[in-house]
Image (cartoon, rainbow, N blue to C red):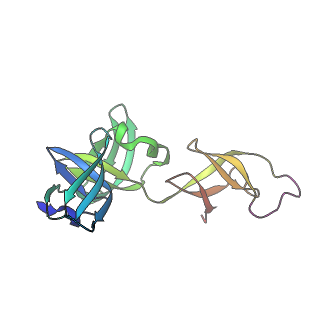
């Protein structure tokens, strides 16, 4: 489906010369003289190369139809990461390259948003937060109760994070999946 370049927004998927690109940022530029243009910064989905293109605001680009649905993570093997659609139980295998650093935050049953184009997974979005147990951290030092002081800790998934001084090994904590930063102690 052709759409005006100026109508694209961040996260839109476009088809340019048979290759899929995801829009990272979009800016409409209106110079004092001349034709207004739309500056698109995009990433090619197949290999991750970043591209910057300019279009006249009236130019048409081919928008790709992407099916975004919730999938549950099942397991990982040599083929990649296996997800299941909870509505119809269809399974999809996502390549390791597509999952990338997000692999550390995938637990059995984690519900993720998976974008699929022509039966091929093209993007994976994790939930914003995940709960993990602290497996290793420094002991509490008496008198170190100042608010805002943090100490290093290792989560059950192997990710290092900084936690408040009162958190001990064995405590379950909530972390942000984007960067692994501590949010709060788990309420379970």
In this rendering, is residue 81 above or below 23? above
> 187 or 26, which lies in front?
26
Q: Which residues are magenta?
A: 141-148
Magenta highlight on residue 48:
no
Instruction: Please give the name of the residue rendered at 36% of the width and 37% of the height, measured from the top-left corner.
Output: 97
Magenta residues: mostly which secondary structure?
loop
> 81 or 20, which lies in front?
20
- Coordinates of residue 46 in the picture (x, y in percent): 26, 40
Instruction: Please give the name of the residue rendered at 49% of the width and 48% of the height, measured from the top-left corner.
Output: 105
- The quadrant in which the C terminus is found is bottom right
> 41 or 45, which lies in front?
41
**Direction from residue 124 to residue 35 in the image, left or right:** left
User: Is residue 50 among the parts visible in the rendering?
Assistant: yes
- Coordinates of residue 64 in the picture (x, y in percent): 17, 55
In this rendering, is residue 87 above or below 105? below
User: Is residue 10 among the parts visible in the rendering?
Assistant: no
- Coordinates of residue 60 in the picture (x, y in percent): 13, 59
Looking at the image, how many numbered discs can be counted on the residues? 0
- The quadrant in which the N terminus is found is bottom left
Which residue is most to the front?
Answer: 33
> 141 or 29, which lies in front?
29
Instruction: Please give the name of the residue rendered at 38% of the width and 49% of the height, measured from the top-left corner.
Output: 73
Which residue is most to the right?
Answer: 143
The quadrant in which residue 136 appears is: top right
**Direction from residue 180 to residue 20 in the image, left or right:** left
- Coordinates of residue 161 in the picture (x, y in percent): 63, 49
Which residue is most to the top?
Answer: 78
């Amino acid at each position: 489906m052709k759409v005006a370049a100026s109508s694209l927004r961040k996260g839109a998927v476009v088809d340019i010369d048979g290759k899929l690109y995801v829009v990272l940022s979009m800016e409409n530029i209106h110079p004092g003289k001349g034709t207004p243009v739309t500056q698109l910064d995009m990433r090619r989905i197949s290999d991750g190369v970043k591209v910057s293109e300019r279009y006249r605001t009236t130019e048409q680009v081919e928008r790709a139809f992407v099916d975004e649905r919730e999938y549950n993570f099942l397991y990982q093997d040599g083929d990649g990461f296996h997800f299941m659609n909870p509505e119809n139980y269809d399974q999809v295998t996502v390549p390791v390259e597509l999952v990338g650093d997000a692999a550390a935050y995938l637990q059995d049953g984690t519900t993720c948003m998976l974008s699929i184009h022509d039966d091929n997974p093209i993007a994976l979005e994790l939930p914003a937060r995940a709960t993990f147990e602290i497996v290793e951290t420094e002991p509490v030092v008496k008198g170190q109760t100042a608010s805002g002081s943090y100490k290093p800790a290792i989560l059950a998934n192997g990710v290092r994070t900084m936690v408040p001084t009162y958190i001990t090994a064995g405590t379950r904590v909530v972390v942000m999946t984007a960067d692994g930063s501590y949010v709060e102690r788990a309420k379970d």
